Amino acid sequence: TGFRLTVVGEQDDTTEKLKFREHVIAGLTNPTKALSSVYFYDDRGSELYAKITDLEEYYLTESEREIFESYANDMVTTHFCPRNAKRNEIINIVELGAGDGRKTRLLLKALISHRVKFEYIPIDISRKAMANLFRSMDKAFPKNVLNVHGLIGNYLECLRYIFLQHPSRENVVAFIGSSIGNFSSQQASHFLQKLRAQMKPRDVLLLGTDLRKDARVMQKAYSDSAGVTREFNLNLLIRMNKELGTNFDLKKFEHVAVYNPEIGAMESFLVCTEAHCISMATTESGSKGSTTSHHFMFKQFERIHMECSHKYTPDLISEMLHTAGYQVRDQYFDNRQWFMDTVSVV
Ligand code: AVJ
């Protein structure tokens, strides 16, 4: 028992950095400039996201917390117990993109109170986020009741690693907090299919998704009055300046978030307030002769697309899960019906 950490797959800093660089060059050369929110989560980005989840305007976290508070016991007794109720068999509680685990804690408490034996396996890309998670889990539970195995790496690679390590264990895979919202609906379906292909019959998926609602409510959640979300977006420019040697001047960019009803998603942009040119340092590694310097022209009011946060309806989610080969067992809602957690099985 206790806490363990495993790094899965190669964590090669130089290839990661090269990928990041290629991504930025492609994204800023495109006629409609775009960067990907997957790069938000360096240590500072994870910290800022944790701050966002504390904001009242960012209703998602509180709504899902309410769902777990009301229904964690029901989820455990109805869906998460090992099928044969042989309670001596350990089950895996796998969490994709664990963050600080404040909501997951409610699930784990319910499992413990029903005497289900389990290993909690959080997966995250940020080591610092994982360290914080370990600390908060250690504080929240008495000594020796939790068995935690944290994995650092890519979701699907980590899942393959777990399923190979424990081929006969039952799995509950939690993908909560509307993390799936960053995928386009096509990417989301594709990811769910790949996930399903790795799961065993009767393994459980717990999927947390944000629901469509009054656009004003959603827009406030993504442009909060304290400016934390603004800082969260600007942090990617800071990261590029640090890691790629760009010279973004943060004062020349404004954060804007709008709901796009055509795709059912909140979209975040950094809008450039004056025309200027950004340059990027040349790489030193001359092996590939990659010494071209890069410049990116910004017109006044031109914007960089930073993030999509997709919002769903219960029917859209059921349909997507069904298409991906899952059977939907239950949908849980908060009182306002702003958020939903769906339990489905393979
Ligand atoms: C971490 C993807 C769930 O899209 O709501 C929060 C990230 N972006 N505020 C979301 C985010 C701006 C968040 N997810």
Image (cartoon, helix red, strand yellow):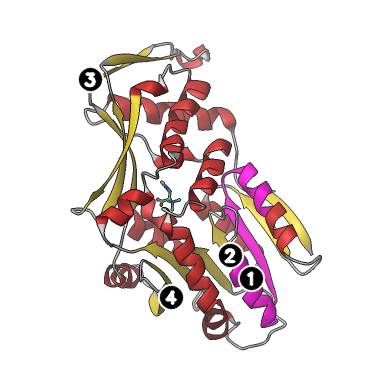
Q: Which mark is residue 108?
A: 1
Give how far apart the Cα atoms at labels 2 and 3 are: 44 Å
Q: Earlier in the sequence, mark 1 or mark 3?
A: 1
Give how far apart the Cα atoms at labels 3 and 4 are: 47 Å
| Magenta-tinted stretch | 104-133
Q: Nearer the viewer, mark 2 or mark 4?
A: 2
Report the residue marked by disc 4: 344
- Give whichever of 109, 273 is nearer the camera: 273
Q: Are marks 3 and 4 in contact (CB under 8 Å)?
A: no
Q: Are marks 1 and 2 in contact (CB under 8 Å)?
A: yes
Whether residue 205 is situated above or below residue 177 in the rendered picture? below
Q: Amino acid at mark 2?
A: Thr
Whether residue 25 is visible here, answered yes or no, is: yes
For label 1, the crowd category at 10 Å Cα-Cα, with few meaning under 14, some 14 to 19 and many 20 or more, is many
- The location of residue 119, given as percent across then percent down, is 68, 67
Give how far apart the Cα atoms at labels 1 and 3 are: 51 Å
Q: Earlier in the sequence, mark 1 or mark 4?
A: 1
Q: Under tag 4, what secondary structure?
A: strand
Report the residue marked by disc 2: 104
Please state if 1 lies on the left or on the right of 20 as rendered.
right
Give how far apart the Cα atoms at labels 1 and 2 are: 6 Å
Q: Residue at x 51, y 41 (%)?
A: 41
Q: Residue at x 57, y 47 (%)?
A: 153
Q: Amino acid at mark 4?
A: Ser
Q: Amino acid at mark 1?
A: Leu
Report the residue marked by disc 3: 299
Q: Residue at x 60, y 38 (%)?
A: 11
Q: Residue at x 42, y 53 (%)?
A: 58
